[in-house]
Image: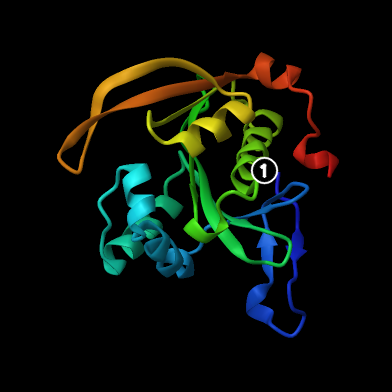
Amino acid sequence: MTEETRISGNEHDAEADRELSWRAKSVGLAALDLDDAELLHGWRSDPETAHQLGIWPCSLTAMRERVERDIDDDERDDFLILIPDSTPVGHVALTGQDMVNGAAQVELMLAAQHRGHGHGTAALDALVDLAFGELPMYRLTAETHMDNAAALAVLAKSGFVQEGINRAACLHRGRRHDLAVFSLLRPEWEELNRPRAWDS
């Protein structure tokens, strides 16, 4: 499941090298580390990101504690998304992993300055390939605000199907928001006409 590959942007900068847990054509997924808390904190503190995700930005201390807790959680896998020059552009996660029923949720967050370049779709495709190609998952789910057009487009492009709406499920900025509920089943993934992560 782990491919010991490195993305090197600058051979003289050892900190730019990051061992990859999973690799696809245009992105690599590196297991989240405690040192990544500051990076995640910065991304989550961006007002647009906070609005799109419906989150309340937390302190750096709280983010460090959260990352430490998540790393120790056996039911989730968190990754930094790296492009070929080793630049981290976002975070993707497989959470709530139920190995008995083969179900899990996907989460995706891109840094504001790296949106619109296809990194979200590439990272989600790579995570889906990991879930179905290396883990015994049968059903993946995702939720996003109905007005988050970018997330809706990425999910659809990666083969997810909208199966419903959780009405007024999220309170954000004094308003109730509907959440779109998406899923992708293993047979649907098998029918997708795209290269798999391991083909790159």
Q: Is residue 199 left or right of residue 188?
A: right
Number of on-image labels: 1
> Residue most toward the bottom?
12
Residue 148 showing in the rendered view? yes
Q: Position of residue 74 (x, y in %)?
A: 46, 43
Q: Secondary structure at mark 1?
A: helix
Identify the colour scheme used. rainbow
Q: Nearer the viewer, residue 138 or 42?
A: 42
Disc 1 crowd, CA 10 A, few/some/many (<14, 14-19, 20+): many
Name the residue located 68 percent from the left edge and 80 percent from the top edge.
14
Name the residue located 38 percent from the left edge and 28 percent from the top edge.
146
Q: Is residue 86 left or right of residue 184?
A: right
> Residue most toward the right?
199
Going by the numbered disc 1, the residue's amino acid type is: Ala
Quarter where residue 84 is shown: bottom right
Quadrant location, the C terminus: top right
Q: Which residue is mark 1?
A: 122
Q: Position of residue 159 (x, y in %)?
A: 63, 24
